[in-house]
Image: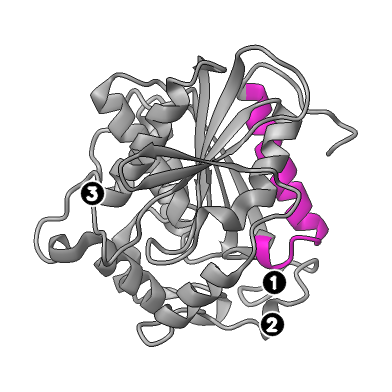
Amino acid sequence: MTTTNFHPDLRLARFLPHSVVGPRRLWLIRRLVRLQPPGRTANAVIEQAGPGVSIRVFRPTTGHGPRPGVLWVHGGGLIMGSAAMDDARCRTFADRLGAIVVSVEYRLAPEYPFPIPLEDCYTGLRWLATHPDVDADRIAIGGDSAGGGLTAALAILARDRGRIHPIMQLLVYPMLDDRSSARTDIDRSRLRMWDQDSNRLGWNSYLGPASVGAVPPLAVPARHEDLTGLPPAWIGVGTHDLFHDEDIAYAERLRAAGVPCALEVVPGAYHGFDHVEAGAEVAKAFFRAQVAALSAAFDGQPDQDDL
């Protein structure tokens, strides 16, 4: 496979833009996201986790008693997106894992820069951990793209506060390192949906004044020096994703710090391929790997008929 070839299952790749967001398009994309209807069959219940922070709660359709819990954090480059756009994924997690899944509606940059979105995620985690139907000893946290980056930061924050102890962090092509925006050795022709210009906009919006000078390490997981004592991780990313190198580096750092980390690299996959081409077999396999990783963390097995 050459550096410009995409996975054969991803037939839309050659037609997609390098990026979908910029300063002039951000307002339009946000408006379009707000107009999207939530999943009709997801049966989400909206709760208030704390001041200014709502969550979407998904309960499994069968079973009873204390259940494992999953906190999910949506993507969108820290500047767009909504919890509702992952309703189908969260509903599937809930039913296949028998878990209570909570998707947090964290507030977006630049209106709400660091640490507000991260604290919103912690508020959602605290709600989940104190819910009477949730087994607090079996809570996983996960997210994709910017949500994956927030999940990695949340794992560090939870470790440092010492009150909630997630058993796993599921990091789906996570946005971990602001310094990727300044790299000059990345072939832009390989990128789809999110490039370095988009990345710079997202990180600068999130960091706010902190984007100049010393960057708070908790805001950028790849900058954090101490990764010891974090929950085991699963990291998945495509070779044609801007975040490929930073994700590989983070996985290596986790392992060096004594944190078990499973790494799934998808050849020829671009950023967000599993959303854009969800029906492709490579996207389905990528999601099955996530369900299997969560199932193993909860000491159970997913229903193979559902996979």
Q: Horizontal and vertical percent for residue 50? A: 34, 38
Residue 268 can be seen, yes or no: no
Query: Separation of disc 2 and disc 3 at Cα?
Result: 37 Å
Query: Separation of disc 1 and disc 2 at Cα?
Result: 8 Å
What is the residue that sits farthest to the left in this orientation?
Answer: 213
Give residue 267's quadrant in the image: bottom right
Q: Horizontal and vertical percent for residue 184? A: 34, 76
**Is disc 2 surrounded by few (<14), some (14 to 19) or many (20+) residues within 10 Å?**
some
Provide the residue designation for mark 1: 6
- Could you tell me if the residues under marks 2 and 3 are in contact, i.e. CB atoms within 8 Å? no
295 drawn magenta: yes
Mark sitting on residue 14: 2
Residue type at mark 3? Pro
Query: Separation of disc 3 and disc 1 at Cα?
Result: 36 Å
User: Looking at the image, which residue is at 57% across and 65% down?
Assistant: 271
First to last magenta residue range: 275-296
Q: Secondary structure at mark 2?
A: helix
Mark with earlier residue (3, 1): 1
192 drawn magenta: no
Provide the residue designation for mark 3: 115
Name the quarter where the C terminus is drawn: top right
- Could you tell me if the residues under marks 1 and 2 are in contact, i.e. CB atoms within 8 Å? yes
- Is 214 located above or below residue 79 in the figure? above
Which is in the foreground here, disc 2 or disc 3?
Answer: 3
